[in-house]
Amino acid sequence: MSSATDRPPRILLVEDNPADAEWVCEWLEECKAGFRIEHAGRLSEAAARLAGSGADLVLLDLMLPDSGGLDTFLEVRRRAPASAVVVLSGLQDEALALRAVQAGAQDYLVKGRTPPEILVRSLRYALERQRSGERLRAGPGGPLRSAGKLIAVLGAKGGVGATTVAANLAAALARRTSVIAAELEGMGAGLAECFRIQAGGDSLWESERPDEVELGRRLWKLPSGLRVLLGPRSGPAPAEVTPEQAEAVLERLIWMADRVVLDLPPRASAANCAAIRRADSVVLVIEREPAAVAAGRRMLAFLRGACRVQGLVRLAVVNRVSFACPMPLNEIERELELAVSAVIPPNPDLCLQARKTGAPLVYFQPESPVAAALLELAGKLEEEALAARQTA
């Protein structure tokens, strides 16, 4: 008897438009992807097929003759919880497709705008992510658990204090749930310095198939219960993490904790894009001065364009020093077309004292205005995560 990995993956294409269905089938055949494809034009037909032969992956148009919107995805998820789902979207439906990703879809693709190789790659990654998740959920005899939430933090440019924000968010969330703080790059004043960790050696970020047991061993366990995964730091110029490596490590981390807070370098890189597209929330950190706001505008273009992130971005304004003429918040919001979610007041002396002790501000002096603002931001993110879970 052959195993599931010995046979071609079964793809159920749910699409009522014959031209769009033909486009998908022709491109998959052209790429010789090795998928076994079935087609359904209505949700009722798809439900019957899922109840019968099932599917490894459902490629789903959300707007069907007998169902429309997010309800289409939720019904497919209810009928096929073990199947990966990739949403097909028109340009006018991208916001809806993003909501489906937030509710549990692996990815979304825009009809007519996705090259064949990207289509195949997305389907293969979705299948692998679903299989990895099922293996981790089942565990060695353990109970099933749902995936954790990923919060990505990145600065509009270097030196704005994004790592400090990430470390404090992780520490604040660790008070109420299991949290892993991770960084994609370990050079400079990273998480090791924030928590006074004596770092050394290589990192599992360079592996495309990290072993879960070894990954657990690489996590630094702090007295607070927070666990920390440091980024690559061996040598003067460690190899850059690839998108595949970033996805592989993150997929395992989100099954090991309820929340993963990821500190990203301030670059429009392919690895950053892969991580951000997996995130449930993105915190963009800027300062109240024109250069940081201009950098924030460029970073938002990257997030909204290449990363296809729309409603997930939260803006944190950090005042590391007192500016003589700080930009007004309403002007920043107008420039970036994004509401400010948190304003972190300046207190460089307190930040330096906390860093010397290896304790984040939310532990070192929780009653301070700086810590209070960080705790409030963590609370907002947690409320959003709980609301998303209830909606799903």
Image (tube, rainbow, N blue to C red):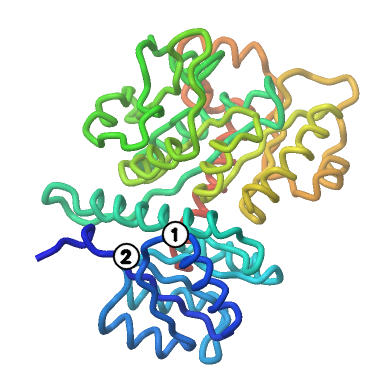
Q: Which residue is mark 2?
A: 9
Where does the image place residue 164, in percent across and percent down from the top left? 57, 24
Where does the image place residue 224, in percent across and percent down from the top left? 35, 27
Give the vertical position of 11 relative to 326 (above or below): below
Where does the image place residue 268, in percent across and percent down from the top left? 66, 35
Q: Residues within 10 Å of mark 1 (few under 14, many from 20)?
A: many
Q: Residue at x 41, y 55 (%)?
A: 124
Q: Residue at x 72, y 32 (%)?
A: 286
On residue 123, which mark appears?
Answer: 1
Left or right of 179 on screen, residue 193: right
On residue 364, which mark appears?
Answer: none
Image quadrant for the N terminus? bottom left
Label 1 – label 2 distance at C-alpha: 10 Å
Q: Residue at x 61, y 52 (%)?
A: 312
Name the one closer to the observer, 191 or 384. 191
Q: Residues within 10 Å of mark 2 (few under 14, many from 20)?
A: some
Q: Secondary structure at mark 1?
A: helix
Instruction: For residue 29, say whether it is visible.
Output: yes
Q: Are marks 1 and 2 in contact (CB under 8 Å)?
A: yes
| Amino acid at circle 2 | Pro
Q: Residue at x 58, y 42 (%)?
A: 273
Q: How many marks?
A: 2
| Amino acid at circle 1 | Leu
Outermost residue on the left side: it is 1
Q: Secondary structure at mark 2?
A: loop
Image quadrant for the C terminus? bottom left
Give the vertical position of 186 relative to 152 (above or below): above
Where does the image place residue 275, in percent across and percent down from the top left? 51, 41
Q: Quadrant of residue 214?
A: top left
Instruction: For residue 387, say whether it is visible.
Output: no
Give the vertical position of 15 relative to 174 (above or below): below
